[in-house]
Each structure stands twice: as structure tokens, then as C-alpha cells.
Image (cartoon, coloured by chain):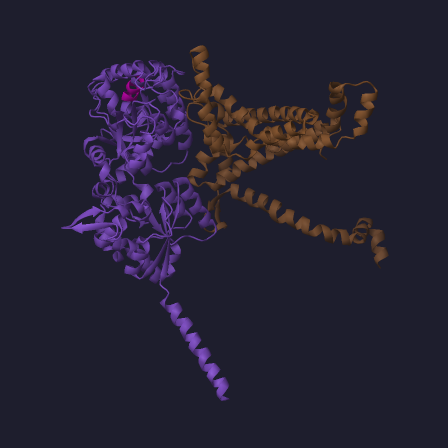
Chain colours: A brown, B purple
Amino acid sequence: MQSVKGKRHPLLRKLWKQRAFFLMLLPGLAYYVIYKYAPIVLGVATSVVKYNLRKGLAGSKLLDPWYSNFKFFFESNYFSQLLSNTLIISLSKILLTIPIALLLAILLYECHSVRLRRCVQTLTYMPHFLSWIVIYGMCFSLLSETNGLVNVLIRKLTGHTVPFFTDAHIFRGVIIWSDVWKSVGWQSIIYMAAIAGVDPNLYEAAHIDGAGRLKSIWYVTLPSIMPVVVTTLVLKCGNVLDAGFDQIFVMYNTAVRSTVDIIDTWVYRTGLEQWNISLSSAVGLFKSVISMILVILVNQLAKKWEASVW
Amino acid sequence: MTKRSFVSLLLALMMLLCVTSALAEEPVTIHVYGLGATIPETDPVLPELGNRLGLKIVVDTAAGGADAATGLMTRMMDNDIPDVFRVGDLNNLAVYHESDAVLDLTPYLDQIPTVVAAFPETDWARLTIDGGIYGIPRRGEVNYMDYFIRKDWMEKLGAKYPTTFDELYDLCVQVRDADLDGNGVNDTYPISGSKLESRAGTLNMFFTAYGVTQPNTLMIKDNKAVWACTDPAYKLALTEIRRFMEAGLIDPEFVSMNEDTLREKMSMGKVFLANGGWCAFAKQAQQDVLKAVDPNADWGHIESNIVTEYGISGATHTAANFSNVYAFSPDLADDPEKLAAALSIFEYTISGEGDELLCYGLEGVHYTKENGVITKLPAMNDLGYGWAIQFTGRDDMVYCMTKFAECADEIEHAANEVPVLTHYEALVSQPEGVNMADLKAYESEQLTAFIYGTRPLEEYDDFVQELYSLYNLGTYLDAATETLTELGYIE
């Protein structure tokens, strides 16, 4: 009987043969369905209803028209500014952090003094553990126009001060560079690990062929860890519309909002402060769709370097 | 049945009786979710209140307004609504009402006659949605806002207190050039403060002197709802501010500062004049901070007001004391005993001994009373979380003068001498087709640009037009007029 069935459905037969593996897969699958896919469905549903806080989704009414929240977001006078700010800040952070972290990892790897290496490594990844509130306090003490250390120096040298916190364009730099400072050490750990995994024979071969340190970095280290770099890039593209809510919310003010107001800060002001959960869900959905498209595009691009994630 | 099993049965029965009677005697517990300082475990006030009313009262607090609202929302979504909870503002109350997460108190008002009588009709009207009353108001507070000035520097300069902006300008120029903190650098910006939109905003002296309230507010002028920044006097106030900014008399960093950074700058001798509440500058601990660098620093309220033909400099105040409303869980409707208990807290503490207990603590421990006059004992300083448990507020002037006697001078000046302008936007819900968050954000950004000179003031009328054409201010003003007429503010 079974063999007849198998003949009819070769796929079913194959599946049945591997039933033990599928059984083992089940818990993992269940995890994704319950914790990853179900929330997507709930999120989509929440974005098209007037959410009832107490009764939940079941007690909520469908919006009329159902796309009202999306319309509200897209029609906001701030939409284009929000999108461009988010992309500029996010991409700048990604494109600056990756090469600097890479450089740091290579420099640390090439450093022969173990003590110095450990010291620098610890110092560079320490900021990762600081909260943005603390970093804001540090930035303010350093960059404040009236009594910040940096500005005191600048005033002594030039007689002028630099409005780090009130000039919109300079402030965007403060946002980007403070994030690079915070994350670069942590990011470099991944690259350090990748470099440590490079086959030593390759270096020896390069050395025998007459390559110096710079050339072996260029021809051995970099090509070997390129897949890891591309992978981190693809993964970061998945979060490209998260330009760092915590940081910007803590640090921004009305004088600089035009250049650092991002989608998430708008959602906070417009949606969450007025308990409009549905609006937040709608914007979250929009962000997810854009991020997914970007991840697919970047991965396609990565295929050209044979370094794609899938 | 053997004798032994009979005895064990009897014992079991007795134990059961003990347990049930113990359960029966367990007092009703009322969970309150509020705002303010954390209630310490050693708090003697709430247990005493519980004893007097035969209840157990558990108060849970969030430190900030946004935290409190988020915490409440999470509880509502978990279907774990606290019995009594503080509501942040009118819009939130409406959201809770739409979600059936708040109790209509109308059928139960006869249980709290003293509370009902204690507040005017208008207060109850504000809390009415679709004919039902959804919250209990809180007694309002007197004005705390004032302008604080370095009195020792005034003496050093031998200057007189300014009454016009020209006089203030000259005084600030003197301060800017005199290096009064003696550090050898001209790094004092005479006027500093924090934020633009807050009632403690740096520039409120300018706005109020021109008869208008701070940005992002709604006023009533000539019996009409007016969005403050569209008033013609606003441009004049901004012109004045611009003059001070250009001369380096206003701290260019004020938009990025808060109360703490301001106090720090004040203590370092970088500030001459700042706006804020006496509760932020006059208390002993704060005075210690302000005098940390220069023990001779003497911060006190300014002795004069700036007058223009449009108004007098002073403070602003919101017409809605909505940060101070308590609402009830709809689940209490099914538990009349618990609801009665929750209501009794408000009825008991609105006046008399209940009020005294929540405001001043225990007689003999925290205060003494003679001929009706309450005198503070040192232990009253332990009750620093008073605001969080004064469910119906307090007789504010008497309270402040008793509890913060060392600030009496500042309290009286702020409450009696500082003129106060009222603003009304917290009473108005956002109408369909208007995005107030965007409008307010745009207004703040553009006003900041005018102040910093990045947008010329000649374009001010264009800016006002933009509020109408891009942000539908007209629709909002129509809704505001309707609401304020209903509430009796506009005739």
C-alpha cells in the first residue's frame, strides 16, 4: 500500500522517510510560528483597526477606510523629511562603522604587544555598555557651547565657539559620530574573530612569495574576511529604518530637529504619546516591508561577490 | 467512628473555621497606580489611613508622566487594571473611555458628596464624556513659577531692577561685560533656562510681557480661541528676543538644556537670570547645589516685572489640571464593596483629618497642632512623597507654607505677586484631519529658527499662513471654539 502511495507521491514518500528529522524540527518551527509569524499577523491586523486597549484585537473595530493609519503617515508633511533623515543617519552609521571597525580589528590583530592589544580592545568596546543618557551627559560636558571642554579649547584657539547642539547640520554629525564611537569597538570583535579564523598557511605562503605586512593584509586578510563583512552589511540593512530612537530621543531639541527627526521619534510623538497603537503598528509594518526589500536587494548584490547570506 | 478519628475531624473543622474567619477579616485591598516619588516601605501614612478606613491601600507609582501612562497602558492590555489610577490628560481619558477601560462614576456620586461639593461644575464638566463622569479632579495648585536672579550681582553692580526690555537689555549687557564670576573670560550668558515650550521656558518673560503664552499653546483673547503664536504680539516678542540673542545675552544652548543642566550652569556662575519654580531653586538641597561653587551666590526672585503696552511679564498656567485626575477600574462595578471602599478614600481625604493625614503625616510625630495651626516637626522632611499620595490634592498655599517654611518668601511672591496667563489646549481633543503633533513640532522648529536668525522675521506672516494651509489650524480652532464654548470659557 505504502509503496503504491510512494510511487504516486515521491515527495510524500521522501518526507515520510525523514519523519524523525521533521519531528526534531518541530519545536524550532513551532518557536518561529508562535513568536515570529503570529506577531506579524497580529501586527498587520492591529494596523488596520482602532485598537481597544482592554479587549484587545477581538474587541477592536476595523478602521474606515482600513488604510487610514498608512494614509495619516504618508500624508504627514514630515513624511519625506523623516524618510530622508532616517536613511541618511542610518546609512552613515552603517557605512562609517563597518570600515572603521574593520580597520580597528586589523590594527589590533597586527599589534604584537598583547597587553596593549587587550587594553585598547577593552577601552574601545566599553562604550557599547553605556546608556545613551550617560553618553548624552558626556557629550554635553565635552561639547557644550558655554562650558564644554572642547568649546573652551576652541574658544582659546580661535575666539569663537561651535554650536554643536544647536546647529542642525553639525548636530547630525554629533549623532552619527557618537554612535560610531559607541558601536565600533563592539563591531570589531566580530571581525577580530573572523581574522583569527584565517588559515595561517595563507600568510606563510604570502610571506614566502615576498608579501610584506601591508600586502598580506590587502591580499590575504581582507579577501578572507570579506564574506563576514558582507554578512554584517546585509544584516544591518535589515534595520536600516531603525536609525537609533533611544539616542536621538535623548539628544535632540527643537533647534536641530529638522535634520535628525526620524520615523521612530515621529511615531513616538504622534502615535505613542496619544496611545495610538494602531498607527505605530502601521508604521512598523511599513518599516518591515522596506527593510525586507532592502535585504533582498543587498543580498542579490552580494551574490556578485559570492558572499550572499543565502 | 472511633474516638481518635472524631477528634481529628473536630480539629480539622476548627482549623477550617480559623482559616475562613481569617479570610473574612482580611481587609479590602485597593490598588492605586499613580505618579511621583516611590512610597518607601517605612511609610506610616498609608497604613494609618488604611486603619482608619478599615482597608489596605497599596500605592504604586511611576517616576515620570510618560512612564506612568505607558505602565498603565501595559496593565490595561494585560487586563490587569489598577482599582484606582491617575490619568495624564483629557485625550488619554478619552482613549481609555473608548476602550471601556474606565468606570463611569455618575451612578456612584452620591457616595462622595463632599468631593462632589468641593469642585466647581466646570471641573466636573471637563471630565464628562458622553454624559458620564469618568474621573475625580484634584485641587489645583498655586503658581510656583518665578524669575530667579543673582541678587549679589545686582548689589555688586548697584543696579536697579528693570521694568522695560530696554532696561533689562542694558542690565544684561553690563553683566555680560563685567565678568562677575571673576574667571577672566566673558563667558556668562545673562539669561538662561530650558526648553521653549515649557512653562519654565527661558523665554516666557518675553512672551508674557507681550501678553501671550509660550509656544504650542491655545489662548482665549477677546472671547475667541487664539493659537498663541498667531497673535500679532508674538512677532513683537520674537523681535525683542532676537535683539537679545544677537547681543549674546541669551544662552544659545537653552533649547538643549534641562533643569539639571541649568542648575549646574547657575552654580558655575554662568547665569544671571533664569525662569523656574521655587520648588526647583529655593529648597535647601537645591540652594546647596547653587552655592556649591560660589558660597556668596544669592539667588532670589526678581523684584520687578517687565511691562509693555501688551502685558506684564509673569507666569503661565494650564486651565486643565489634568495631570491630577484619578479614574477607577470598570471592574469595580461588579464589586460594590470594593468600589465603596475606593470611593471612601477620596471622601475621607478631601478635608478635615483625612486631608491633614495625607498632607502632614501623624500628629505628634510629623507635626504639632495648636489652635488649628499646624507646625512642622523635623520628621515631616521624611514625607517627601506627599504629592503621590495626596489623592485629592491639597489646600496648596497653606500646605506649601507649612511644609516648606524656609521658602516662604519665594512661595508667597510666586503665588501672589506674579501675574499668570492661562492657556487652554489641554482641554481640546484633536479633531479629525488635523495632526497636532506635527503642527506643534513645526511651530517649535520654525520659532526656534526665527529666534536663532536662521529664518528672517520678515517671513513671520508666511509662517502663520503655513500653520493654516499646511497644518489645518483653522479646523483645530473651530473644534477649540466649540469645546471651550461648551465648557463655558467662551460665551
Residue at image location 41% in from the left, 32% down from the top: B437
Q: Is residue A233 left or right of residue A134?
A: right
Q: Which residues are magenta?
A: B232-239
Residue at image location 21% in from the left, 37% down from the top: B408
Q: Is residue A75 shown to the viewer in this render?
A: no
Furthest-bottom residue in this view: B2
Q: Is residue B94 left or right of residue B413?
A: right
Q: Is residue B237 magenta?
A: yes
Q: Is residue B74 shown to the viewer in this render?
A: yes
Furthest-top residue in this view: A158
Q: Is residue A194 left or right of residue B435?
A: right
Quadrant of the rendering where the C terminus of chain B is positioned: top left
Examine the image and state in which quarter residue A227 appears.
top right
Q: Is residue A122 magenta?
A: no
User: Which one is nearer the viewer's eye here, B476 or B360?
Assistant: B360
Residue B70 in the image: above or below residue A307: below
- Horizontal and vertical percent for residue B53? 29, 60
Residue B294 in the image: above or below residue B327: above
- Horizontal and vertical percent for residue A65? 49, 39
Query: Magenta part mainly helix, strand or loop?
Result: helix
User: Which one is nearer the viewer's eye here, B135 or A175?
Assistant: A175
- Horizontal and vertical percent for residue B60? 39, 50
